[in-house]
Amino acid sequence: MNDLLWFLLVGLIAGWLAGSLVKGGGFGLVGDLCVGVLGAVLGGYLFGSAGIGVGGLLGSILVATLGAVILLVLLRVVRRLT
């Protein structure tokens, strides 16, 4: 249960940071949480595929934030195409 709470907390922080970094702002609390959690999964996959390992809370937030930034950029590109 604690691991899930930490994962959601990291996702929320990452989503908020990504929303602050990418022009256009965030998606609100729930939207930022979703973007952060999906970004954490995407970032973990990308970093794992590249053979880059990070540890600790700060490393998890960094990976999740980078994944969330990539996800937000992709979402904005798709939104512009439609």
Image (cartoon, rainbow, N blue to C red):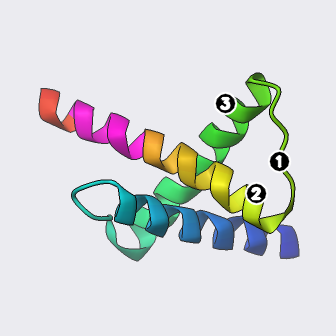
Residue under circle 3?
A: 46
Which quadrant: the C terminus? top left
Residue 51 locus on image (x, y percent): 82, 26
Q: Main secondary structure of the magenta part?
A: helix
Residue 79 seen in this snapshot: yes
Residue 52 locus on image (x, y percent): 80, 33
**In the visual, does 29 lie left or right of 75?**
right
Residue 82 seen in this snapshot: no
Mark closest to the chain's N terminus, 1 or 2? 1
Residue 11 locus on image (x, y percent): 60, 63
Q: Residue at x 55, y 70 (%)?
A: 12
Q: Do tag 1 and tag 2 residues touch (Cβ < 8 Å)?
A: yes
Decide whether residue 73 is among the magenta residues.
Answer: yes
- SS type, badge 2: helix
Mark closest to the chain's N terminus, 1 or 3? 3
Residue 74 locus on image (x, y percent): 35, 34
| Image disc number at residue 59 | 2
Decide whether residue 65 is among the magenta residues.
Answer: no
> What residue range appears in magenta?
71-78
**Distance in Å between CA atoms under marks 1 and 3:** 12 Å
Q: Along the line of sight, which residue is nearer the eye, 41 or 18?
A: 18
Q: Residue at x 34, y 40 (%)?
A: 73
Q: Residues within 10 Å of mark 2 (few under 14, many from 20)?
A: few
**Distance in Å between CA atoms under marks 1 and 2:** 5 Å
Q: Residues within 10 Å of mark 3 (few under 14, many from 20)?
A: some
Residue under circle 1?
A: 54
